[in-house]
């Protein structure tokens, strides 16, 4: 009995026990219990086709049983590294997850592993609101997953692709993918409840993007029932947040505030500091719209405090922009200027193009109020350039209309018309709704 046969037999037995199979069950229908026993004792060497059959029943590769111990150790260590990176795929730690995935990609060779890592990279980019980068990674992942025929991976890629399309301002295309996935879930006998809840939630979000607020509310209501049934706290947070945005868009600011408070309560129960920061920021926006500036400051200061503790750091720039906008509403242009400049510095340090663009918009408003429309136009051009690079059509359209107004203010009617025409070409884009 050679060491290699003994090692093969030990691995076969370990895999069989972990799978909960008897020797007879593993061998059926082609091999007897005695044959499997002899293999596990290292008394006989199996033919390759026999080993392929047994490995298939155990859900393992042939290499798992025949590779030497060093290779097996290396495989297990790599799997642990991939799992560790996957565990970091949350809003607050997406940046670290992305760095680990990128390191793993430099040594990946198998198509199945490459597809998995590219999917993880795309997911991380989505958490970081980097839709263009997410689509690039997911397109590669989609091609690789098709090669190896991994349907589960393909569906996960499709879901993330829909989220990426929302991030770049393509809600109609996103809705098509989400609807197809929901149809698949409803046809399967198992019916993945968590996936169903996420798809209904995301369909609510794209309906909001498209201005279909009643439909968004209906999708969110369905998602809410599934989230309650599953007991998914993170799902509840995102759904309450979505309902709040839908209520706000329908003019129900009190209802929106109530749902944001529910979401905040759920985030505190789940100790999700990153989500709590987002929700405090949303409450600040609503308080500002209702003229409650001091309450808005309290909420946004809490959002900034939480983001600096829990991350991601890039979100701090968004919250500073909210504070700057509240200062403008309170007619405190000096404060608005300071907060927006802080936001711009943070955004540039963390490569948050969207927050940088928003900061330029606030600074443009400050400049215009100070009587410098030309300086405001420079700021708005900076914002437009960033929104163009992101594919953020809704924000781009708003900036172009602002540019048209300033050009008209400066007496340049031809330029004003040009900006207005460019704005007309822009369509609705990404939303601020929180997902996971």
Image: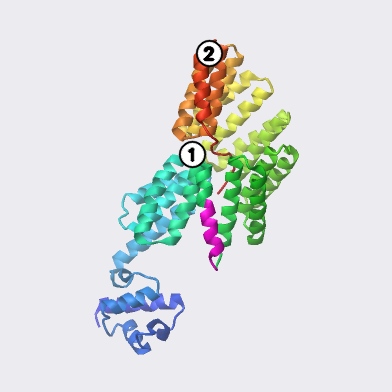
Where residue 287 sits: x, y (%)? Answer: 71, 33
Report the front residue among 153 and 97: 153
Residue 17 seen in the current view: yes
Image: 69 above or below 124: below
Where residue 332 sits: x, y (%)? Answer: 66, 20
For mark 1, give the secondary structure: loop
What residue is shown at x 34% (from left), y 62% (from top)? 75
Residue assigned mark 1: 168
Separation of marks 1 and 2 at Cα, in angstroms: 31 Å
Where residue 274 sits: x, y (%)? Answer: 58, 44
Q: Main secondary structure of the magenta part?
A: helix
What residue is shown at x 40% (from left), y 71% (from top)? 59
Mark in the foreground, 1 or 2: 2
Image: 326 above or below 245: above
**Magenta stretch contains residue 179:** yes
**Magenta stretch contains residue 397:** no
Image: 311 above or below 380: below
Image: 259 above or below 361: below
Question: How are the residues colored?
Answer: rainbow
Report the front residue among 89 and 376: 376
What number is the disc on residue 202? none
Where residue 109 sits: x, y (%)? Answer: 30, 55
How busy is the neighbourhood of tag 2: few (under 14 within 10 Å), some, or many (20 plus)? Answer: some
Give the magenta part as a residue range: 178-189
For mark 2, give the secondary structure: helix
Residue 358 seen in the current view: no
In which quadrant of the rendered view does residue 246 lie? top right
Residue assigned mark 2: 413
């Amino acid at each position: 009995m050679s060491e290699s046969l003994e090692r093969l037999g030990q691995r076969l037995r370990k895999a069989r026990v972990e799978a909960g199979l008897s020797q007879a069950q593993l061998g059926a229908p082609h091999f007897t219990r005695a044959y499997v026993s002899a293999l596990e004792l290292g008394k006989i060497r199996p033919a390759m086709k026999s080993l392929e059959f047994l490995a298939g029943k155990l859900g393992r590769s042939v290499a798992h049983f025949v590779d030497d111990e060093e290779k097996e150790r290396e495989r297990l260590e790599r799997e642990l590294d991939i799992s560790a990176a996957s565990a970091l795929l949350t809003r607050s730690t997406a940046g670290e997850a992305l760095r680990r995935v990128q390191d793993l990609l430099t040594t990946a060779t198998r198509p199945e592993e490459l597809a998995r890592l590219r999917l993880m990279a795309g997911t991380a980019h989505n958490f970081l609101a980097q839709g263009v980068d997410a689509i690039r990674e997911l397109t590669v992942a989609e091609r690789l997953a098709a090669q190896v025929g991994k349907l589960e991976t393909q569906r996960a890629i499709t879901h993330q692709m829909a989220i990426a399309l929302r991030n770049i301002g393509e809600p109609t295309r996103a809705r098509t993918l989400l609807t197809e996935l929901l149809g698949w879930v409803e046809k399967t006998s198992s019916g993945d409840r968590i996936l169903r809840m996420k798809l209904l939630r995301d369909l609510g979000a794209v309906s909001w993007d498209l201005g279909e607020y009643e439909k968004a509310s209906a999708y969110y209501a369905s998602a809410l029932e599934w989230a309650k049934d599953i007991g998914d706290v993170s799902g509840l947070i995102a759904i309450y947040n979505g309902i709040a945005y839908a209520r706000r868009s329908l003019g129900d600011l009190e209802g929106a505030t109530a749902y944001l408070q529910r979401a905040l309560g759920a985030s505190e129960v789940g100790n999700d500091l990153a989500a709590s920061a987002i929700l405090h920021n949303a409450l600040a926006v609503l308080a500002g719209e209702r003229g409650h500036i001091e309450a808005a400051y309290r909420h946004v200061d809490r959002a900034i405090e939480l983001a600096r503790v829990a991350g991601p750091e890039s979100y701090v720039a968004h919250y500073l922009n909210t504070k700057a906008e509240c200062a403008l509403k309170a007619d405190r242009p000096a404060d608005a200027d300071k907060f927006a400049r802080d936001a711009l510095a943070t955004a540039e340090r963390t490569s948050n193009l969207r927050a940088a663009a928003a900061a330029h918009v606030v600074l443009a408003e400050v400049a215009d109020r100070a009587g410098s429309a030309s300086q405001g136009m420079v700021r708005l051009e900076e914002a437009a350039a960033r929104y163009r690079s992101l594919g953020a059509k809704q924000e781009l359209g708003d900036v172009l209309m602002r540019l048209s107004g300033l050009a008209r203010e400066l007496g340049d009617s031809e330029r004003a018309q040009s900006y207005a025409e460019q704005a007309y070409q822009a369509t609705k884009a990404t939303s601020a709704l929180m997902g996971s």
